[in-house]
Amino acid sequence: MNIPSHSELQKIMRLMRSIVFPEYYPNRDFSDQILRGLLYSQLSTVMCKACNDDNSSCIARTADAFIAALPELKRLLMTDVQAALRNDPAVKDEAEVILCYPFITAMLHHRTAHCLMQLGVPLLPRMLSEMAHSETGIDIHPAATIGEYFCIDHGTGVVIGATSIIGNHVMLYQGVTLGARNFTYDANGRPMDLPRHPILEDHVTVYSNTSLLGRITIGHDTIIGGNVWLTHDVPPNSRILQQKAVETPSFTDGEGI
């Protein structure tokens, strides 16, 4: 059985890292043709074999389209680096962000995977996302749409679902979940891939361990505090904080909350 190679995908991502951050990850062996060749090889394992056109031509067009998208991918990732510099006072310089911040690794994988998914490539985007998930603890579905100047501080435990839409200049902290509240099933009892994750407009900040669930919209310039469970829309310029703790009588043995 012809299946994708994890080791070859890792090579692709190392080349991607060198393309985007050549000053920090120099690679003397890099060229567009080397990346294209690796990509073509992996695309050939997953691209549809039933195309009306010649399959090799379809794969070649997809590989060429990805290579053409490299300048925009680099631009977007550099905005993510700038977002970290603007949002984290602990950062000293660009090098610290690129070399030390796990969200940069996660976003390198995500923006690569998202581009491939937009080109109609099956399976490989999910594999790239899971590689980053294993390395960083940040779980971003490749179908999620994320704008420029995006930043995740600390990162561990962040989950961004497939139909999430994130605007520009959005900041998330560790443990944030952009998840689904429920599913719609078809006549055969299978869950349908409908919009079910949140929309975050521009300049939204979400603090640690907050869950935003369902197809809700968080208006621009909103701050969501930590440990919040939110399942409804929020208008622009809002401030949402955790409710105060509720005191209850002491429990006797054998009882729970």
Image (cartoon, rainbow, N blue to C red):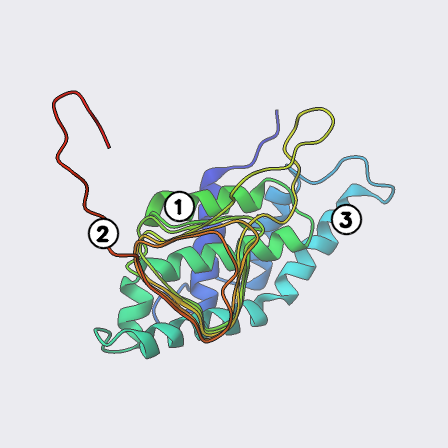
Say what amino acid the circle numbered 3 marks.
Cys
Placement of 196 over or under 172, stated as above or below: above
Q: Secondary structure at mark 3?
A: helix
Q: Where is the N terminus found, in terms of image quarters?
A: top right
Q: Could you tell which of marks 2 and 3 lies nearer the N-terminus? A: 3
Q: Which numbered disc covers residue 123?
A: none
Q: Nearer the viewer, mark 1 or mark 2?
A: 2
Per the image, label 1 sits on a secondary structure element best described as helix
The residue depicted at 55 percent of the width and 39 percent of the height is 182
Q: Hey, which quadrant is residue 189 in on the image?
A: top right
- Between disc 2 and disc 3, the foreground one is 2
> Pointer 3: residues within 10 angstroms few (<14), some, or many (20+)?
some
Name the residue nearer the viewer: 54 or 158: 158
Q: Is residue 33 above or below residue 222?
A: above
Q: Is residue 30 left or right of residue 100?
A: right
Percent from the top left, x then y, of residue 237?
A: 45, 76
Residue 148 drawn at (x, y percent): 50, 71
Residue picked out by circle 3: 58
Amino acid type for the residue under numbered disc 1: His
Residue in the picture at 19% in, 46% down:
247
